[in-house]
Amino acid sequence: MKIAVIGSNMVDLTSYITRMPILGETLEAPDFTIGCGGKGANQAVAAAVCGIDVLMVTKVGSDIFADNTITNFKKYGIDTTYVQKVPGMSSGVAPIFVDESGQNSILIIKGANNKLLPADIDAAEEDLKKCKMIILQLEIPLETVYHAISFGKKNRIPVLLNPAPATKSLDINKVCECDFFVPNETELAILTGMPTETREDVEHAAASLIARGLKNVIVTLGGRGALWMTEKEKKYVEAYRVNAVDTSGAGDAFIGCFASTYVQDSDVLAAMQKASAFAALSVTRKGTQMSYPSSEELADFLKKNQPPQIL
């Protein structure tokens, strides 16, 4: 069984800071790491770690980061047949700033990710048709996202769209063919123009997307858990309580684990519970992909902790 991730890869340049410097100020930061990241790549790695075969469709540059990114995919057993180099372009990079509370601020330079085009999906058509789900994000051109959604519908392949980073340019009418739409609360606010501070706010905003034709909206809420909403249902999966060190990549951890679990048993709530555990473990460590637990570590965590409540 295999899923496909059509999306981005980035090189994470993570600075751990006490605070952001003000304009014109220079501060010393306590620590720095370089790692493989990007929403698409993170989700692919998370899914692979959770026990599913993954086909990655992405573009890297022709710089020093490209081969390392491809090697990293292969380390996790991810199919790199459609990971292609773009001559004369940089790979995507993401400077990340993590404060002492574990919260992060991120810049992205898309680089070669901007060259992932609809034709690349067509080139991978025969292998994509064998996949049980397609996962998408918004660090690649919107035309490619829309084409992938149409491809999924045409070939009866479920599509999960993580609308991140959120942009008001996203045409909700064009993404209604997705089976799962998975924003966090900040992305939900940007996409709907509605507040998401309280649980009631989140529900109203998610309901507005359901009213526009989306089938399943899952809103990840960090320490507040996650909301699943359909036209007929509304369920919360509470979060596991852990000491967060670095929240970078937690949403991607959730999505990759959710997809891996869901395609194997078609149980949304069970997949959300497992994904919550995987994401919770990831925030207890620094980094994005390097923070993701092994299948053994996840199994041990699930054995020692009661599953989160479903409300």
Image (tube, rainbow, N blue to C red):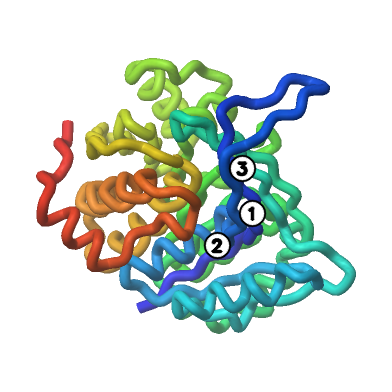
Q: Secondary structure at mark 3?
A: strand
Q: Is residue 154 above or below residue 131?
A: above
Report, in whole angstroms, how far the alpha carbon at label 2 lies from the one at label 3: 20 Å
Q: Earlier in the sequence, mark 1 or mark 3?
A: 3
Q: Residue at x 52, y 65 (%)?
A: 5
Q: Residue 108 in the image: x percent, y percent?
A: 70, 46
Report, in whole angstroms, how far the alpha carbon at label 1 lies from the one at label 3: 34 Å
Question: Disc 1 residue type?
Answer: Tyr
Residue that mark 3 sits on: 15
Q: Residue at x 27, y 67 (%)?
A: 295
Q: Few, some or many C-alpha atoms within 10 Å of disc 1 (few <14, some 14-19, many ≥20)?
A: some
Label for residue 58?
none
Residue that mark 2 sits on: 41
Q: Earlier in the sequence, mark 2 or mark 3?
A: 3
Q: Few, some or many C-alpha atoms within 10 Å of disc 2 (few <14, some 14-19, many ≥20)?
A: many
Q: Few, some or many C-alpha atoms within 10 Å of disc 3 (few <14, some 14-19, many ≥20)?
A: some
Q: Quadrant of residue 224?
A: top left
Residue that mark 1 sits on: 146
Most foreground residue, 83 or 264: 83
Q: Residue 114 in the image: x percent, y percent?
A: 76, 57
In the picture provided, is 30 more to the left or to the right than 238?
A: right
The single residue placed furthest to the right in the displayed view is 88
Question: Disc 3 residue type?
Answer: Ser
Q: Residue at x 41, y 53 (%)?
A: 253
Q: Are marks 2 and 3 in contact (CB under 8 Å)?
A: no
Residue 178 visible to an observer of this rendering: no
